[in-house]
Image (cartoon, helix red, strand yellow):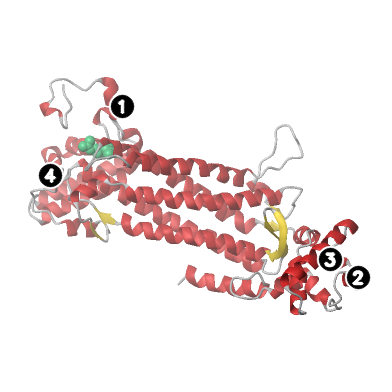
Amino acid sequence: KTNQQWGGRFSEPTDAFVARFTASVNFDQRLYEQDIRGSIAHATMLAQVGVLTDEEKDQIIQGLNEVREEIERGEFEWSEALEDVHMNIEARLTQKIGITGKKLHTGRSRNDQVATDIRLYLRDEIDAISTELTRLRTGLLDLAEREASTIMPGFTHLQTAQPVTFGHHMLAWQEMISRDHDRLLDCRKRVNLSPLGSAALAGTTYPIDRECTAELLGFSAPTRNSLDSVSDRDFAIEFCAFASLLLTHLSRASEELILWTSAQFNFIDLPDRFCTGSSIMPQKKNPDVPELVRGKTGRINGHLIALLTLMKSQPLAYNKDNQEDKEPLFDAVDTVKDCLRAFADMIPALETNKTAMYEAAKRGFSTATDLADYLVRKGVAFRDAHEIVGKSVAFGLEQQRDLSEMTLEELQQFSTVIESDVFDVLTLEGSVAARSHIGGTAPEQVKIAVATARQTLNP
Ligand code: ARG
């Protein structure tokens, strides 16, 4: 017996291995809800234009609703012989309602059907991800506000550079993630178009109404070219590109969290519920959650490359290659959701160790630039000021003392323009407060930046 859906022109059944090799049902059954939604819209439209009677349409919708319930109750029997989610559902519908079930596929192909399903799926997931992004960004803004005046060392080359505020550092993360959020919402515009009606590749001879199905499914419009609509998966690639950048940012943040929880930094504490222990070393508390997020970046980058490579040589229009789009996309969605959840839960629970951060900022001569700027204000050329401060730092290293811990006389060995007001700029507080302009690290600016960011978050 040849295949029941398309076996008419075949003279022998599909090879058992080939059937397994070409089947996608074990992973694309995840699209069942979108597939049924799309079919209901298609049937509704077919009745509106007179291709189906209202009675037939009602029977189809009733049958599809029952199939959905069977699937959700776990009673549906998925069959690999029926290849994919689309043919499994259609076959069951026909089993239930008879000949009318076979009319559902009028004016449609699995090619526009699957393109529609993926777009519906991705749009739903984008909305869920957007909500998580907002939750994470809110957490970062709350933390930034709470820690607007907390002083820590700022780094370049991972060497102490200048003091910054912890709130300012959290705002930097928030900026990165807000750009990812923008990218996601921009990608949504291109996802939210309806390929339904493109049929196999060239459109269909039935008097279909593509505006109608687009509207029924909440798409902003029908896609404009049938060949393109059934074949390109650039919208999924775009989503993975968003995911790669997001994970790149989360990975950088994870790296910092991991460093900061180490005894050597001791800047923050992650509550026990986000950490795990060691089976051999009793003293250990490991930051597994950020480590895993950092690690997951690799698989996301892999999915992006997989989809790009999948697409790159495909001639128009649909090719079976595209069946390979689903597993990377599904995994990218799941991974992004898990990583965002981990971060959104973790950020509000971070505890800062203000003393350790402050002491670390003091240790690394982090106000050296402030001393140079002070000398410039007293009329010294910047390059000369740089040299003077360099010598002061060398002296400090030898004496194991910070610039702020030297006496006025000691400082005056290096430049006679130095007066007692120098100590105002050598303190960490003076240093951060002085950087008070848009985007600067001063506590005052951090508070303004938080307020501004909150407005863009909830416009
Ligand atoms: N399972 C297929 C996919 O994921 C559905 C479309 C198949 N179309 C076809 N003509 N073989 O792409």
Please name which of the two marks, 4 or 2, marks the residue nearer to the observer.
Answer: 2
Q: Which residue is mark 3?
A: 403
Give the numbered dot on residue 106.
Answer: 4
Q: Give the mark nearest the N terminus, 3 or 4.
A: 4
Camera-nearest residue between 28 and 240:
240
Q: How far apart are the alpha carbons under marks 2 and 3? A: 9 Å
Q: Give the mark nearest the N terminus, 2 or 1.
A: 1
Q: Which residue is mark 2?
A: 407
* 221 to 313, vertically: above or below: below
* 360 to 373, vertically: above or below: above
Q: Is residue 121 visible?
A: no
Residue drawn at 27 percent across, 58 percent down: 219
Label 4 crowd bin: few (<14), some (14–19), many (20+), radius 10 Å = some
Q: Is residue 91 left or right of residue 452?
A: left
Type of amino acid at the residue the image marks with label 2 = Thr
x and y, in percent, of residue 317 in the image: 21, 43
Give the structural element (helix, strand or loop) at label 2. Answer: loop
The quadrant of the image that shows the C terminus is bottom left
Residue drawn at 70 percent across, 52 percent down: 260
Give the structural element (helix, strand or loop) at label 4. Answer: loop
x and y, in percent, of residue 24 in the image: 31, 34
